[in-house]
């Protein structure tokens, strides 16, 4: 199923029009990476499956609300990670969020930043951050969560997220200076 | 989407990401890249077992199917009714808008007539128990039942099917008749006194239809009811008092009829099988 570039939006348009086949196409391409990415944040496969399912139900119902800006995949991830937070809140004991080993992701919308992460000093600086600080950077910057949502995902108070984010920024500034 | 980057994670890097062995920086880059790169997303598809994806997909389809059912069916499901039962109930004629319109219109016309002449109001009340009777018979009589071929071929308990569908129609038509009757200047007694005879007649039709066609059964019961009205009415007063049948002895007779009909229906339920000639 090789689709030409730029068709994600078209497929989503068909989903919005109530086309279940289109939802199937979207699922075939986007469910796998979503499963993998969620698995790095939650080590309960059953819960991940549930979240993926919730996400595509939300995509089906909310396809018409996609504003057409940015990547469809980013929109799907935004739904998915928030569903994960909701699911973790419902079953706080059944799952644990992978923090230190999966941490250290960074903002990446711009290509320079992306390349910098992989090849430049920023990547090294991130790796040298303490796991708690990296987890906060990951949740807020890479996963695009608000301070409050990040707190829920990581199981820490909102205030702690803010202070750790400030410490992370200070540390990065020092490293890259 | 068209990748806007010159950088792609190679096969080794993707595999490391899948195995959770990628370093923090590589994992971050890969995840960000996946949001924008159609090719790399497809490359990751084999990393999740097809069985897992198919199972999640099946559950997803079930949920979307369930959400697409009419709200009445969703309400019935929430009340604890099984999926098959809810579907069967919804196939009953009383679940059609046309049915409600037709019955509602007929009753309204009756009410208009009753408003102009008290004698007509009496007549409406006399005929009130016959409305659910006829509607119920029509809901499963072979000659009216559009779903007959389907139900005959479906492995579903016949008795259950019959009671569900007849029940749906009986409840709906009785509710409509109650609304209509309450508009009459008869007070509470006038509104509810015909309910017991109506229920008894409905069950009697079901019981009778273990021997004869449901339409014929409805005819017999209707005739029996009108005879009872006539007999009771002339026993008391002249001219005819059409509502005499609703007195205490009439209600007791209804209870007796109900009891007999229930026993007959339960004993002969196998004969109601839509696949076999009545």
Image (cartoon, rainbow, N blue to C red):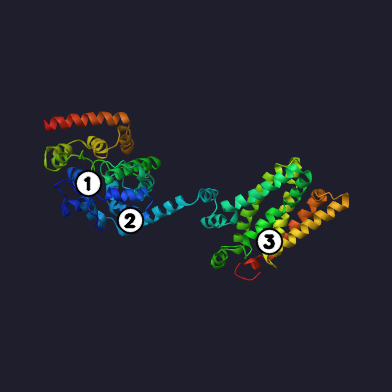
Are dots 1 and 3 on a single chain? yes
| Kind of element beneath mark 1 | helix
Q: Quadrant of the C terminus of chain A?
A: top left
Position of residue A167 in the picture relative to residue A146 (left or right): left
Q: Quadrant of residue B147?
A: bottom right
Residue A9 percent coordinates (x, y): 28, 47
The residue singled out by tag 1 in the image is B36
Whole-angstrom CA distance, mark 1 to mark 2, is: 22 Å
Residue B243 percent coordinates (x, y): 80, 48
Q: Quadrant of the N terminus of chain A?
A: bottom left
The residue singled out by tag 2 in the image is B53
Query: Dot 2: few (<14), some (14–19), or many (≥20) neighbours within 10 Å?
Result: some
Residue B215 percent coordinates (x, y): 68, 63
Identify the subunit bearing mark 2. Answer: B
Q: Are marks 1 and 2 in contact (CB under 8 Å)?
A: no
The residue singled out by tag 3 in the image is B206
Identify the mark nearer the N-term, 2 or 3. Answer: 2
| Foreground disc of the pair 2, 3 | 3
Identify the subunit bearing mark 1. Answer: B
Q: Residue at x 22, y 55 (%)?
A: B43
Identify the mark nearer the N-term, 1 or 2. Answer: 1
| Kind of element beneath mark 3 | helix
Query: Dot 3: few (<14), some (14–19), or many (≥20) neighbours within 10 Å?
Result: many
Query: Front-most of B85 and B140?
Result: B140
Position of residue B121 in the picture relative to residue A24 (left or right): right
| Kind of element beneath mark 2 | helix
Query: Front-most of A83 and B199?
Result: B199
Identify the subunit bearing mark 3. Answer: B
The answer to whether residue B213 shows anywhere in this view is yes
Q: Quadrant of residue A90?
A: top left
């Amino acid at each position: 199923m090789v689709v030409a570039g730029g068709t994600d939006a078209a497929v989503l348009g068909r989903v919005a029009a109530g086309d279940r086949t289109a939802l199937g196409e979207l699922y075939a391409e986007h469910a796998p990476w979503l499963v993998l990415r969620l698995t790095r944040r939650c080590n309960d496969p059953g819960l991940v499956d549930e979240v993926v399912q919730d996400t595509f139900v939300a995509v089906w119902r909310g396809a018409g609300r996609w504003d057409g800006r940015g990547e469809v995949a980013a929109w799907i991830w935004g739904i998915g990670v928030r569903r994960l937070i909701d699911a973790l809140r419902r079953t706080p004991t059944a799952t644990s969020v992978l923090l230190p080993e999966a941490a250290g992701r960074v903002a990446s919308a711009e290509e320079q930043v992306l390349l910098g992460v992989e090849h430049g000093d920023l990547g090294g600086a991130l790796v040298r951050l303490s796991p708690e600080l990296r987890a906060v950077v990951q949740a807020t910057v890479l996963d695009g969560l608000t301070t409050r949502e990040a707190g829920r995902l990581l199981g820490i108070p909102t205030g702690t997220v803010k202070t750790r984010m400030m410490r992370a920024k200070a540390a990065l500034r020092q490293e890259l200076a | 989407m068209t990748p806007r980057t010159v950088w792609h994670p190679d096969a080794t890097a993707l595999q490391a990401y899948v195995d959770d062995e990628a370093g923090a920086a590589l994992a971050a880059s890969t995840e960000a890249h996946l949001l924008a790169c159609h090719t790399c997303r497809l490359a990751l598809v084999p990393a999740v077992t097809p069985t897992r994806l198919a199972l999640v997909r099946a559950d997803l389809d079930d949920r979307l199917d369930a959400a697409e059912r009419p709200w009445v069916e969703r309400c019935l499901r929430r009340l604890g009714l099984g999926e098959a039962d809810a579907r069967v109930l919804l196939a009953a004629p009383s679940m059609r808008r046309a049915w409600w319109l037709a019955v509602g219109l007929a009753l309204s016309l009756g009410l208009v007539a009753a408003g102009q002449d008290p004698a007509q109001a009496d007549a409406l009340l006399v005929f009130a128990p016959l409305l659910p009777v006829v509607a119920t018979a029509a809901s499963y009589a072979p000659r009216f039942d559009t779903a007959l071929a389907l139900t005959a071929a479906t492995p579903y308990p016949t008795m259950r099917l019959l009671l569900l569908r007849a029940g749906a129609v009986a409840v709906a038509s009785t509710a409509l008749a109650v609304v209509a009757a309450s508009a009459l200047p008869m007070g509470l007694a006038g509104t509810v006194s015909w309910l017991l005879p109506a229920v008894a007649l409905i069950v009697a039709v079901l019981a009778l239809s273990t021997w004869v066609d449901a339409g014929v059964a409805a005819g017999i019961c209707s005739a029996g009811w009108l005879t009872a009205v006539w007999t009771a009415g002339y026993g008391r007063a002249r001219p005819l008092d059409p509502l005499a049948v609703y007195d205490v002895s009439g209600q007791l007779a209804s209870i007796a009829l109900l009891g007999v009909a229930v026993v007959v229906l339960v004993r002969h339920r196998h004969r109601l099988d839509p696949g076999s000639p009545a």
